[in-house]
Image (cartoon, rainbow, N blue to C red):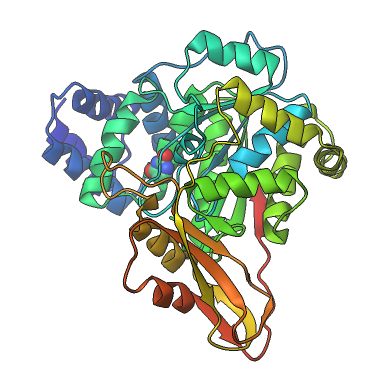
Amino acid sequence: MKALEIIYKKNTKEKLTYSEIEYMVNSYVKNKISDHTMSEFLWAIYYNGLSMDETYYLTDVMIKSGETIDLSSIDKKVVDKHSTGGVGDKITLIVSPIVASAGVCVPKMSGRSLGLTGGTVDKLESITGYKLKITKKEFLNELETVGCAVISQSDKIAVADKKIYALRDEIGAVDSIPLIASSIMSKKIASGSDVIVIDLKVGKGAFMKNIKDATKLAKTMVNIGKYYNKKVICTLSDMNTPLGRNIGNSLEVKEAIDFFKGKYDKRLYELVVYISSLMISAAKGISQRKAKNLVINLIESGHARNKFVEWIKYQGGDLNKLKDNAKKYIVVSPKAGYVNEIDSLSIAKLVHDLGAGRHKKTDKIDYAVGVVLNKTIGEKVNKGDILGVIFYNKKLDNMEELFINSFKIDKKKRNVKKIIIKTIK
Ligand code: URA
């Protein structure tokens, strides 16, 4: 079987067989075909798409290229949660202990920051002592005793995806729905959960810029789940505005700590409660309304907070010792009005340039830098009010200007867009 024939077949919009896709992926993993040939194959998919069956074949081959995790020894329902990546998205830190405190098991393998969006692993690394690499036995023990665990993505899972994703990133072939769906789902299915809840971000600060494409991606991922008898639930949530008030690694951990102290941003709270309820309702087979009441109770009673503290401590972290050593620069509003927009993309770029994100995989990041939004969308602001605070270690000449320009302040208040757009099951 020849790679060029397979590429030609895809370029002429013919359907590929399982063994043709398997041949391409496995040959690439074993270095039997070059980056150049694989790029041609990826471009053929990028421009011509894949059918649902072909998307499943690609997912399956990528799953089989690595290890799969067997969680069958755990006698609770196991639910995974995945976010496609957003700005200020710290909800894994909050949702995992909430769901675990309801008696549902949450095993999470998370990634580092990618492009402009932050990664849960980087956030957790800003807690002194937190161990992201533990043995499989320790992982299973933690799931049995604590009920949730968050570790870094294993190199041994979906090995082909790792190599192919790096190439896609290099050649600019990331934003293809079948490629994204198979990439995410290969890792999620290999990770062994019964239910997978995906928070699919839509808007300026996300991969998916519009609801139409996001819906297509969501349906593709839900359908992939069906081939494996896994329940996949996909919620589209708004990412035009940063999520919550704090953006930056240790700042986001602080916001999670504040959340459990009862101090929370309204939109963050709404999304946390919604995603937690979806996870619990699917795992326990109860209605979403019942699950929501349970979630609110777990938050208000302090049970979720206790679970949060227990989990971080179990993995060696000291919540009193965050890597948060940065200088503060207070930004005041140059005018009065209502905050109608906060551009998540420009806030993400600012936080990235302050040092919170990477340009290349090997870059070192600054855990302490970022921004806090004192004012958020829908709120009234007077001239001279504090708009927010920039946490920096290397001052950028234009940081104040970039921060202020991310805000759209008008005389008239606009309706605030809902954070939850829709859910596809
Ligand atoms: N996240 C992934 O894991 N894969 C993609 O292709 C895009 C986002």
Rendered position, 110 above or below 369: above
Q: Is residue 101 visible?
A: yes
Q: Nearer the viewer, residue 40 or 348?
A: 348
- Residue 89 in the image: state x and y as whole percent: 55, 50
Quadrant (top left, top right, bottom left, bottom right) of the C terminus: top right
Confirm whether residue 282 shows in the render.
no
Examine the rendered structure and indicate whether residue 10 appears above or below residue 205. above
Which of the four quarters of the rendered structure image does ligand 1 lie in? top left
Total numbered labels: 0
Front residue of this view, candidates 413 and 202: 413
Q: Quadrant of residue 292?
A: top right
Question: Which residue appears at 61% of the width and 39% of the height?
Answer: 93
- At which x and y percent is residue 111? 43, 36
Relative to 105, 54 lies left or right = left
Residue drawn 66% across and 41% down? 94
- The residue sitting at the bottom extreme is 411
Q: In which quadrant will I find the N terminus?
A: top left
Residue at 66% x, 43% y: name it: 257
Residue 315: x and y in percent read 56, 22
Left or right, 55 with reference to 7:
right
**Left or right placement of residue 68 versus residue 319 in this view:** left
Q: Nearer the viewer, residue 238 or 315?
A: 315
Using the image, determine if residue 250 lies above or below residue 413. Answer: above
